[in-house]
Image (spheres, rainbow, N blue to C red):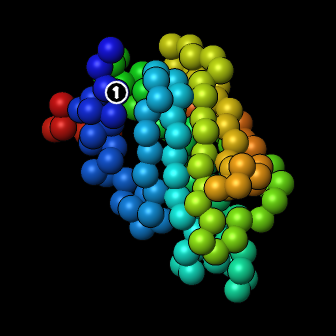
Amino acid sequence: MIDLKQHPIIQQYIIWNRFGDLLGMDFKVEKKGHVLYTMMINKDHLATPFAAHGGSVAALIDAALGVACLTEVCEEMKVVSTVNLTISFLNPAHKDDVLTADARVTKSGKRILFVEGKVTNQKGELVATASATMNAYPVSKISEKVF
């Protein structure tokens, strides 16, 4: 099986996703439809002197859910966008925590994908859970010059 992280569409996503760089996120494709995304909580992620802003955790899980879906459709020369995202924050993320978002596609249709995920810290404590609906569409709709 091809390493999906090396697929041209996913490589272009990495180049385009400046926000992921800003937050210090990185990911690993476990297999088609399954992605692990990581982020270390630093001072720039904080909402209080010790706890991360929920938006940082939300960005991590949204990225993981999106890339999990992207691995499902990239070979069809499609990209995805978030249609709906539901997050439950269960425990705080603290400065210096290393968070891992584990995202898995639960159903993949021609245009609509359903995906679920969870965020844990380095101790295995559950920080958040999420589910999303994603829309898949041809990459040509966002950039005819890339591919």
Residue in front for this viewpoint, 123 or 116: 123
Q: Is residue 138 left or right of residue 116?
A: left
Name which residue lies at 33% across and 34% down: 5
Of 20 and 100, nearer the camera is 100
When asked about the image quadrant of residue 70, the answer is: top left
Where is 68 relative to 23, above or below?
above
Q: Residue at x 57, y 80 (%)?
A: 43
Type of the residue with mark 1: Leu
Pick the residue in front: 122 or 92: 122
Q: The C terminus is located in which quarter?
A: top left
Query: Residue at (70%, 86%) from the top-left corner?
Result: 49
Residue 141 percent location from the top left of the image: 33, 33
Please determine whether, in this image, residue 130 is positioned above or below residue 69. below
Q: Which of 145 and 17 lies nearest the eye of the viewer?
A: 17
* Quadrant of residue 143 within the rendered picture: top left
Mark 1 lies on a secondary structure that is helix
Q: Residue at the right extreme?
A: 90
Crowd around label 1: few <14 · some 14–19 · many ≥20 (10 Å): many
Seen in the picture, residue 21 relative to 86 is either above or below; the reply is: below
Residue linked to disc 1: 4
